[in-house]
Image (cartoon, grey):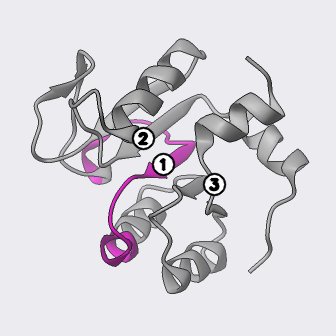
Amino acid sequence: MKKLADREIASILRTAKTIAVVGASDNPSRDSYSIMNFLLKHRYTVIPVNPNYQSVLGLQCHPSLSDIQGEIDIVDIFRRPDEVPSIVEDAIRVKAKTVWMQLSAYHEAAAERAAQAGLDVISHRCIKVDYLSLIGS
């Protein structure tokens, strides 16, 4: 699987409009909450995905990626590694462009599967940290 260079990741972050956050939480102490909040403040349309919530940060929460209408540029995953393969399959089905596996959400076989299906795969990285270092504040 090809590892994306920083310039490629920066390009993805610059062109993306819609980010689905799988594992969204309404708990302010959770990383998914603070990163969703950050993404909202930086021009992105953010779609929370978690079957346990009706809304997160005032946004309608969807039970799964397949319940989202419209294009998804990035699927940002905040789930345990054993849950990642099914999320990747959903991302492929909905024709997402990029799968972003947050620092603790990596699954090697799922990353390979996403890449083989033509999705860009970013793993072992934090979208907020990369945005700040590659794009700026």
To which quarter of the image does residue 90 belong? bottom left
Question: How far, Cα to Cα, is label 2 from label 1?
Answer: 6 Å
- The N terminus is located in which quarter? bottom right
Residue picked out by circle 3: 125
Q: Residue at x 65, y 74 (%)?
A: 115
Report the magenta residues as a range.
66-86
Residue 14 in view here: no
Q: Residue at x 48, y 65 (%)?
A: 92
Label 2 vs 1, first from the N-terminus:
2
Residue picked out by circle 1: 76
The one nearer the camera, 32 or 85, is: 32
Label 1 environment density (alpha carbons within 10 Å; few <14, some 14–19, many ≥20): many
The one nearer the camera, 69 or 81, is: 81
Check residue 85 for magenta coloring: yes
Is mark 2 in CB contact (under 8 Å) with mark 1? yes
Q: Say what amino acid the circle numbered 2 marks.
A: Ala
Question: How far, Cα to Cα, is label 3 from label 2?
Answer: 16 Å
Label 3 environment density (alpha carbons within 10 Å; few <14, some 14–19, many ≥20): some
To which quarter of the image does residue 133 belong? top right
Q: Secondary structure at mark 3?
A: loop
